[in-house]
Image (tube, rainbow, N blue to C red):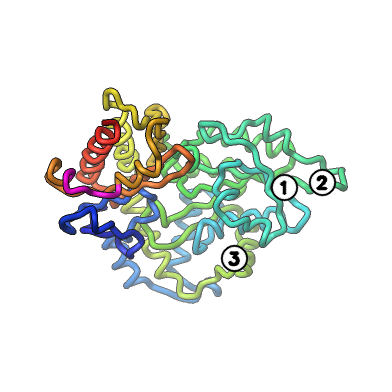
């Protein structure tokens, strides 16, 4: 995504002292959440047929829910405003009360980035298991965290939560076989499995399978449409009819009951036809950038595990001689010397994710031309910082 001199919405302002002009090409790789709705989505929003969704009378919402249920191989689905709400609502339904606990990855979105919603809203405790480098949770480690049902001192384990793709592990893809193994472990201990599939369509695209291939092995699944699918808002949760009936009540309690929500559902339907088939292109863009970094001979500034690039999320390891914050800042800023050397002004936005890891995320608003610019900028900055 290229903008001239600024990021849309004013979130980021370029430091004027670095520029002799405002003719700056900015490529935003901070997240796929920065994507903007497409022209077709905007038209669909404008022309959406609507009704009161709390009464289940919005035809566009109903169509979306039916379509997603079929895509995921589930009996029913439910529109919610965000994937965070979908995750929390799913676990609330599975636990159905207090004194309960869920097992989840220590680097999971549900543990790290949902403001302790399970504890705050449901009185549910999270028990973490270390995420392995490939994003999975060791099956023996999961089993060791399952509580005995007979000990009055301990909460009851109710749910195992997975995340696919795994964000903090660098967009790693959990395989269908692995999810099936977790399902078997859960069944052996009478537990439910919830899949935080915010980027499940990316996982399916990476493995060239269907989303339902994963979903068939879990009791509930949540999918975000406001990330790589480019919608401004919206997520879907899916499961059995009884599960969704209870989830509808839970959604209401969480403040997610919406009225004429067809204006939200309409672009989500467009995304399934227009954006979903292009997700593999985002992965290819991410790989191109990673490959360019690894191809630089004598690169003493940063590295990428090229074999670990599986989707649209990549972690750049900043080596000891470089400062991660300086690297991010230098990718963002443009000097007069740089502009003169490159013949253009390129600003690339990335995110510090760990102490020495910088994340970049490709998406539909990043063109192949943008990727070329990112590579040009990376090569210049790496050579400059190494000198």
Task: Check residue 370 for magenta coloring.
Answer: no
Q: Is residue 139 left or right of residue 367?
A: right
Say if 372 sits above or below 84 in the image.
Answer: above
Q: Is residue 273 left or right of residue 81?
A: left
Say if 372 sits above or below 31 in the image.
Answer: above
Closest to the observer: 177 or 233?
Answer: 233
Read off the residue under disc 2.
Answer: 154
Q: Position of residue 267 (x, y in %)?
A: 36, 62
Q: Secondary structure at mark 1?
A: strand
Closest to the observer: 106 or 78?
Answer: 106
Determine the image quadrant of residue 372. top left
Q: Residue at x 21, y 39 (%)?
A: 376
**Quick check: marks 1 and 2 in contact, CB under 8 Å?**
no
* Label ID, residue 241: none
Read off the residue under disc 3.
Answer: 251
Q: Nearer the viewer, mark 1 or mark 2?
A: 2
Q: Position of residue 291 (x, y in %)?
A: 30, 30
* Label ID, residue 158: 1
Q: Quadrant of the C terminus?
A: top left
Q: Position of residue 130 (x, y in %)?
A: 61, 36
Task: Check residue 336 for magenta coloring.
Answer: yes
* Spatial CA span between label 2 and label 3: 28 Å
Q: Residues within 10 Å of mark 3 (few under 14, many from 20)?
A: many
Identify the mark nearer the N-term, 3 or 1.
1
* Spatial CA span between label 1 and label 2: 12 Å
Q: Secondary structure at mark 3?
A: helix
Identify the mark nearer the N-term, 2 or 3.
2
* Spatial CA span between label 3 and label 1: 20 Å
Q: Residue at x 68, y 53 (%)?
A: 94
Quick check: can you spot residue 277?
Answer: no
Query: Magenta segment range?
Result: 332-338
């Amino acid at each position: 995504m290229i903008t001239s001199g600024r990021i849309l919405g004013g979130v980021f302002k370029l430091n004027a002292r670095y520029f002799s002009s405002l003719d700056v090409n900015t490529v935003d790789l901070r997240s796929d959440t920065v994507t903007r709705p497409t022209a077709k989505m905007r038209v669909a929003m404008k022309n959406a047929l609507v009704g009161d969704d709390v009464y289940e009378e919005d035809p566009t919402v109903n169509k979306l829910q039916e379509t997603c249920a079929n895509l995921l191989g589930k009996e029913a689905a439910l529109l919610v405003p965000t994937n965070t709400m979908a995750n929390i609502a799913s676990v609330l339904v599975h636990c159905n009360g207090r004194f309960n606990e869920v097992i989840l990855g220590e680097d999971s979105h549900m543990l790290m980035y949902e403001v302790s919603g399970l504890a705050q809203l449901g009185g549910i405790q999270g028990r973490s298991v270390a995420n392995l480098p490939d994003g999975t949770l060791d099956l023996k480690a999961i089993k060791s965290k399952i509580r005995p049902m007979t000990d009055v001192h301990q909460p009851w384990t109710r749910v195992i939560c997975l995340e696919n793709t795994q964000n903090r592990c660098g967009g790693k893809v959990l395989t269908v076989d692995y999810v099936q193994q977790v399902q078997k472990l859960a069944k052996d201990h009478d537990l439910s499995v919830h899949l935080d599939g915010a980027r499940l369509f990316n996982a399916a695209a990476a493995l060239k399978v269907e989303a339902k291939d994963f979903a068939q092995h879990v009791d509930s699944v949540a999918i975000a449409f406001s990330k790589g699918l480019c919608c401004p808002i919206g997520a879907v949760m899916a499961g059995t009819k009884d599960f969704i009936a209870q989830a509808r009540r839970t959604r209401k309690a969480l403040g997610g009951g919406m009225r004429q929500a067809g204006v939200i559902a309409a672009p989500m339907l467009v995304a399934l036809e227009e954006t979903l088939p292009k997700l593999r292109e985002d992965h290819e863009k991410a790989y191109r950038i990673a490959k360019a970094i690894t191809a630089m001979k004598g690169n003493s500034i940063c590295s990428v595990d090229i074999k670990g690039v599986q989707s649209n999320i990549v972690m750049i390891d900043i080596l000891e001689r470089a400062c991660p914050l300086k690297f991010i800042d230098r990718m963002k800023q443009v000097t007069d010397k740089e502009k003169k050397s490159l013949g253009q002004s390129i600003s690339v936005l990335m995110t510090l994710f760990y102490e020495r890891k910088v994340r970049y995320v490709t998406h539909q608003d990043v063109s192949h031309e943008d990727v070329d610019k990112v590579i040009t900028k990376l090569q210049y900055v790496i050579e400059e910082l190494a000198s």
